[in-house]
Amino acid sequence: MKQVLIERGLWKNGLNADCQLCKDKVDDITRIDCCARRIISLQPDFLAQKSALEEAILHSTGHLCIFYPKFHCELNFIERYWGAAKRYARENCDYSWSSLQRVVPVALESVDTIMIRKFARKAWRYMDLYRNGITGKLAEYAAKKYKSHRCIPDYVLVELNKVE
């Protein structure tokens, strides 16, 4: 890291590799040169660098890798699919290893395409609400109540924005 910063003319004498704020992941946009890690992390080429997982997926298959925000499983319909499969497995398994090996593939097949599409539409409704500034319990209510095709009607968004 030091060598890269020296080559770029960004190294300062007495600069620490890490500072406590960076170790504690305290995010402060005004802090740009507190330590070597912070300086290098703000360089354009480092910001543009994809993760090893993204690189591997892109280079081996040509596919794109899109990460969902952490702690927002409502945006990922695969979570709902997995939940339905786990429910089936719980109801049809005696919790032995042989039973799990038999039930899990059947559980995954038990969720039909129509249900998966319903899960996807619900995720799209949440995305639409978040894009329009509706969050929290109000978003949960609206996603359950309004089941139009992938989005919440405009007149409903106007009313919901008045409530918040």
Image (cartoon, rainbow, N blue to C red):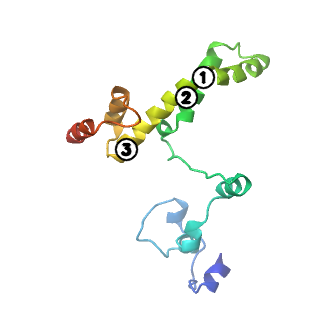
Q: Where is residue 79 in the image (x, y as percent from the top left)?
A: 55, 33
Q: Which of 3 and 120 is in front in this view?
A: 120
Disc sitting over residue 116 in the figure: 2
Residue type at mark 2: give it. Answer: Ile
Residue type at mark 1: give it. Answer: Val
Which of the 4 quarters of the picture holds residue 93?
top right
Q: Marks 3/2: CA distance?
A: 21 Å
Q: In this view, does 76 lie above or below 141?
A: below
Disc sitting over residue 96 in the figure: none
The residue labelled by disc 1 is 111
Q: In this view, does 96 lie above or below 12?
A: above
Q: Marks 1/2: CA distance?
A: 7 Å
Q: Position of residue 57 (x, y in %)?
A: 68, 53
Do the residues bearing badges 1 and 2 touch, measured as CB atoms within 8 Å?
A: yes
Dot placed on the residue nearer the N-terminal end, 3 or 1: 1
Q: Residue 97 vs residue 126: left or right?
A: right
Dot placed on the residue nearer the N-terminal end, 3 or 2: 2
Q: Which residue is drawn at 60% across and 29% down?
A: 82
Q: How many labels does the image show?
A: 3
Residue extending farthest to the right is 98
The residue labelled by disc 3 is 130
Which of the 4 quarters of the picture holds residue 153?
top left
Q: Is residue 142 above or below residue 53?
A: above
Q: Position of residue 90 (x, y in %)?
A: 63, 17
Mark 2 packing: few (<14 Cα in 10 Å), some, or many (20+)?
some
